[in-house]
Image (cartoon, grey):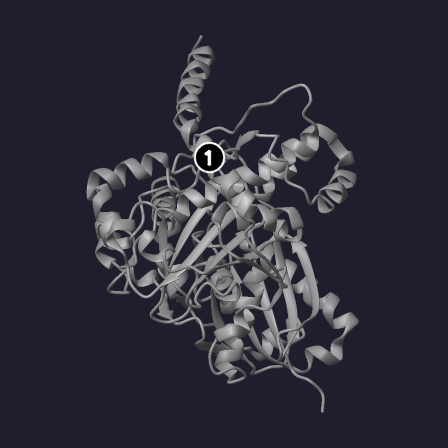
Amino acid sequence: MASEFILTIDVGTTNLKVILFDEEGNEVFRVTRPNTTRYPEPFFAEQEPQQWIENLLAVMKDINQLCPEKLRLVRAVSLTGQMHGPVLFESESGRVLHPCLIWSDARAVEEVRILREMFGDDFFLREMGNPLQQSFTLPKLLWIKRHRPEVFEERSIKLLFPKDYIGYILGGEVTTDYSDASGSLFFGLREKEWKKEILRDLGLPQDMLPEVVPGESTVGYVSEEAAATFFLPAGIPIVKGGGDLATTALAAGAGIEGNLSLCVGTAGQLLLCTDEVDEETLGKLYIFLHCVQDKYFYLGTVPTGGAALDWFLSAVTGDGKHNLWEKIGSLADISPRQVILFYPFLLGTGTPYFDYQAKAAFLGLQMNHKAEDMIVAILEGVAFALKESFERVPAVSEKIRQIILSGGLARLPIFSRIVTNVFNLPVAVSRYADTASVGAFLLAAKALGIVRGYGDSAVGLESNVFPERFYVQHYRKVYSLYRSFLDMVLSFASESNRIQGREEES
């Protein structure tokens, strides 16, 4: 009997990724296409949703040419993707009304000030669980209203998030899930419903909001038109899925009691699931509703995880960094005699300081140091930065018994060894390279009845690394040293920015 398949679509920041999974969660086929981000002005970062559709069409054509018989056996489509970016479109035609201001777009500085004056910082922290920042959806919507008011003159305007727009194109339903809704900054964290009064006070249309459903919900079926366009069987269910952080947390086993997920790809992300909101943690980490019903997850971040290493390799080797990557893969030893500190703040700190103006730094370099020593320091710095976020949730972190490590840096044996000793916890490396897509698969598998619960099927581990007493003690001392110079590094950014500002003025 032929196997059947689940197709996942991930609208990532860098790529649109389509993966075909068999019913046991094995990756059968994958194709990606790059998503173009435009930076028309400083702090702007936007994408065209139409390109996502064009990329999806190109990817599905490729898959259809290579394995058309497998596409005919797809049982469901499940969705995931980048969070926070609003997709505003006209519901009758599907016409997009404005480019999507993606999560990294930071243009809405004035809008944050306006929102702070109208509602206060405490309001957003108390009701939505997160600090008022440009990365969230609400300031972006207010920017569009103030600078492109004609967009909101459309009578049938609707709001979705990137993954949801793909679902709309495939099946015509206007829905989102709890994880993406909670990343908007106008969805109540506890009531789990839209705060429509915020939109009313800002003069934004309240009827543009989508229905909010759990991630494993079937939200429509692939239409005849979409089936013909994208080479899919007509009438198969579209499973809602979740924002990429939520589906990553699910796939990496963060919802299993005693597990902590560290996903370190371009950025470094710490994910902790919880059944309730810890009031003491608000404002220290981000918190969102999970794609799994009645769950929350905390997010700790360092914006440049693997990107810090990639930056360094590009800076010291230019186009020749491929050979050095191979050398890093063979690194295994940690030298306690080479104490170099690296603060991985190339794009700011992320949590727990929320200082996106902070700057990176090396401390302790000497003439005898080699590139490999600096690489190890970068990996240690990323681990230290994530540990700082981990320590901010003692109510949850005290229960952690194991770290699930995923993402690009998880492929480096030395990094898992650093992590296990920095955190003094066993580390299990996930076999999955694309955890967000695996989470989307799991939600579809649950919706179809292939799995009854998430349990251990959400993990898929391939190796284990355990703390070494000597290095645990070593890293305890180095981490203390890292913390002792942290204030100096953070204050340097504000002082240097002030000097740069004066020089530009003169």
Q: Position of residue 472 (x, y in %)?
A: 51, 45
In terms of secondary structure, where does tag 1 sit? loop
Which residue is painted at 30% across and 58% down in the image?
187
Quick one: which residue is furthest to the front in this view? Answer: 470
The number of numbered badges drawn on the structure is 1
Of 373 and 273, nearer the camera is: 373
How many residues crowd mark 1 within 10 Å: few (<14), some (14–19), many (20+)?
many
Q: Position of residue 18 (x, y in %)?
A: 64, 65
Residue 403 as seen in the image, left or right of residue 398: right
Quarter of the image with the N terminus in it: bottom right
Quick one: which residue is furthest to the top in this view? Answer: 506
Which residue is painted at 41% across and 52% down in the image?
299
Of 478 and 301, nearer the camera is: 478
Examine the image and state in which quarter residue 432 appears: bottom right
Quarter of the image with the C terminus in it: top left
Relative to 257, residue 426 above or below: above
Residue position marked by numbered label 1 in the rendering: 348
Q: Position of residue 52 (x, y in %)?
A: 59, 57
Identify residue type, mark 1: Gly
Which residue is painted at 48% across and 83% down in the image?
452
Residue 322 as seen in the image, left or right of residue 430: right
Q: Position of residue 38 (x, y in %)?
A: 57, 41
Of 311 and 199, nearer the camera is: 311
Quick one: which residue is furthest to the bottom in this view? Answer: 1
Is residue 93 visible to the viewer in this orientation of the structure?
no
Of 487 and 155, nearer the camera is: 487
Residue 295 as seen in the image, left or right of residue 326: left
Is residue 333 visible to the viewer in this orientation of the structure?
yes
